[in-house]
Amino acid sequence: MSTLTHGAFNLERTYRASPERVFKALSDTESRSRWGAPSADEALVFDNSDFRVGGLEISHCGPKDNLMFRVEAHYLAIEPQKFIVFSENVSGPGGALSSSLISFALSPVGEGTRLEVSAQIVSYVGDEMVRGNLNGLTTALRNLQGELGEI
Amino acid sequence: MSVTHGTFTLERTYPVSPERVFSAWSDPKQIEIWAAPSDGWVFENETFDFTIGGTDLSRFGPKGEEPFVSLARFDDIVPNSRIVTAYSIAKGTTRISSSVTTVELIPDERGTVLRLTEQGAYFDGHDNPQTRRGGVLYQLDQLEAYFAPEVADAK
């Protein structure tokens, strides 16, 4: 029998940087591998870079000595300096973990940029993976302030 | 450009087996019959690769007009149990929506409960969760009508 768990959450942050800089940090794999890993013991490594509508980007993440999670991102809509929408499939050693639809929307606020993140998730392994996505994105957005500075 | 997000869930019980419902969802020839929009609209599948990671490209819309193009990717397939699809709809260069849709088939004594959940992002107000829900509901009705002759035969 099928067991799917659906979840959705929104996150918001305002960074002390222009929309151009925030957009670059969100789309550049080199920058993303810096702020995308949740902690110093973990890593996010991109197999390729394919940032265009229809593009497929594959990355691996996990503890530095065991990048056990495989992430496939499919870019669905891109508007420079404004938004990025992609779907993401995450799998681990035991198979598929989650499929999600994620959007990053940017808007200028004074000297900075507001980033609104919306994630809609289907987990194949219960609540845990919905929480995992939430924790991962929350930490990544916090790390991003290290790249950009935050208001 | 604006993005609106929304989720809806629909549930239907069909008086046929999960195998039968799964077959109707995984065979492009059957889909063209039951998922076809209302009269005066055309619907055609250009590619249909029903494998995990495979794509489904279809066109639909009022006869004689520029069609909507739907590009789907199968994220997960468990035979007779579930299908997870990420799909985007566009018309020409206008993006309309991107969604992740799950179809779960749950056997019960009346036949099969189909639970469909669509999580979507809608661009620039070209569509919205309420309208999409109505369209999908129409398709689930059509599927019931599609099964009706064989259900009558079995009685």
Image: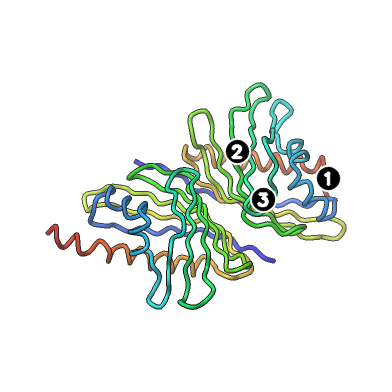
Amino acid type indicated by mark 3: Leu
Q: Are marks 2 and 1 on the same chain?
A: yes
The residue that appears at 70% across and 52% down in the rendered structure is A12
Q: What residue did someone put label 1 on?
A: A148
Circle 2: residue type: Val
Question: Which is nearer the eye, A77 or B50?
Answer: B50
Image coords of residue A55 (percent x, y): 64, 49
Task: Categorize mark 1 by other alpha carbons within 10 Å: few (<14), some (14-19), many (20+).
Answer: some
Question: Closer to us: mark 1 or mark 3?
Answer: 1
Q: Foreground residue, B24 or B42?
A: B42
**Residue B48 vs residue B103, the one in the foreground:** B48
Q: Residue lying furthest right in this view?
A: A111
Is mark 2 in CB contact (under 8 Å) with mark 1?
A: no
B47 vs A72, left or right, is left
As helix, strand or loop, the secondary structure at mark 1 comes to helix
Q: Earlier in the sequence, mark 2 or mark 3?
A: 3
- Check whether the beta carbons of the residues at disc 1 and disc 3 lie within 8 A of each other: no
Which residue corresponds to the image point at 74% horizontal and 47% vertical from the top-left? A26
Which mark is in front, 2 or 1? 2
- Chain bearing mark 1: A
> Mark 3 — residue?
A11
Q: Earlier in the sequence, mark 1 or mark 3?
A: 3
Dot 2 crowding, Cα within 10 Å, few <14, some 14–19, many 20+: many
User: Mark 1 is on which residue type?
Assistant: Leu
Q: Position of residue B20 (x, y in %)?
A: 27, 51
Please name the residue that numbered disc 2 is placed on.
Answer: A71
